[in-house]
Image (spheres, rainbow, N blue to C red):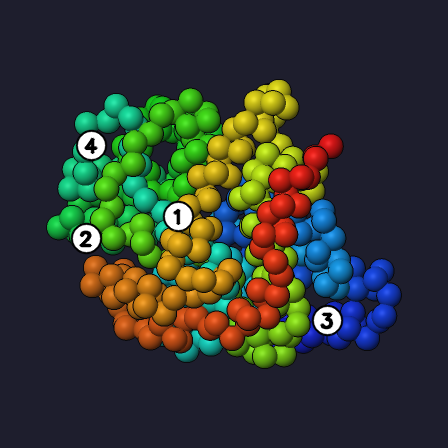
Amino acid sequence: MRRLALSVIGFVLAVAASGVSAQAAELTKLRVGWCARTVSSAASPFAIATKLGWYARAGIKVELVPMPGSTDCVKTVATGDLPFSLPSVEPLATIRSQGVKARIFYTAYEGNIYGIAVPKDSPIKGVQDLRGKRIGVQSMASGGVQVARALLAMGGMDPDKDAQIVVIGEAAQAAALVRSKQADALSLYDTQYALIENAGVPLRMLDTGPIAKYPSNGFLALEETLQKHRKWTVALAKGYAMGTVFAMANPEAAVRIMYEMYPQTRPTGKSEAEAVRDDVKALEAREHAWRLESGGVKRWGESSPANYAAYIDFLLKWKVIKQKVAADDLITNDLIADINTFDPAKIAAEAKAYKAK
């Protein structure tokens, strides 16, 4: 299946590469696994790169494929069903030890997006108070599952016996289940927490120790894809990087472009002003993870071997993964110089001057 899928990808890319017109190039579709069932404002860099023509000029068209979580995102790349995805690193560390040759070639979130939250008025004060509690996750394929298990172990508990991990879904559904007390705590991520608060459920984050400083999601591809389709891989990540700079400089424009490019992301039952306000809040919740200083790096998408190695040691120590994996087997910075061939200051200036319709 993997070889067949890669052959199809190769054929599509080859056809596009052989053409000289912009129209032919625009037909080149790159499918990217989006590791949540719902595309949200956090995907605005893709929308921006599409709207402003950056992807089209590079000869590609990007299609986001929603998936239950990071585990599925990693599996679909491993099998060749998708050429790219944007998962967290925990399932990659597991599957890499099984011989799957895939790497993160662009770290999208230099800081970790996951953490444990509880209702603001909850008696739970710290991770140690999660014993016997129900912890809600987006899906059992989400990186939030591994993070919850690691934190339970760090708090001296057995993740299989001392707490219950339950699926509560996303956004409004998750908010409703928290409100009805079907979950005592949440192991989701920054934008979901913002969306839950937008739905009227105030939250409080617990101190999760070292988790915040570890890297989170990044673009993943098979090594074979990186070698054979470098041009298209660079174009995908470069457009995303430029879109990230734009979104950080003008979050409101980013949200409005998101609505235009992905109409299904616009919330229903709200006025335009309310929808934009709430989604700007969600987008700004992601900003901390996008920032280069969160990972101590200098270039967009750069992967810090030291940060990844520290996270792998943390996951191994708390038995989230069973086998040591070298950070250099999980990441590559080989494409980063090519991805960063743009002027971030120019993009930011264009974003600030942009007037969304």
The answer to whether the residue labelled 2 contacts the one labelled 1, judged by CB atoms less than 8 Å apart, is no
The answer to whether the residue labelled 4 contacts the one labelled 2, judged by CB atoms less than 8 Å apart, is no
Residue of label 2:
153
**What residue appears at the point 27 percent right and 61 percent down from the top-left corner?**
315
Give the camera-side residue of 181 and 205: 205
Q: Quick one: SS at disc 3? A: helix
Residue of label 4:
124
Q: Distance between the residues labelled 3 and 2?
A: 46 Å
Viewer-side label of 3, 1: 1
Q: How far apart are marks 3 and 4 (CA)?
A: 52 Å
Is residue 216 found left or right of 76 in the rendered image? left
Residue of label 1:
113
Q: Point out the tag, 3 or 2, that comes first from the N-terminus.
A: 3
Are there few (<14), some (14-19), or many (20+) residues within 10 Å of tag 2?
many
The image shows a total of numbered marks equal to 4
Give the amino acid at mark 4. Ile
Q: Quick one: SS at disc 4? A: loop
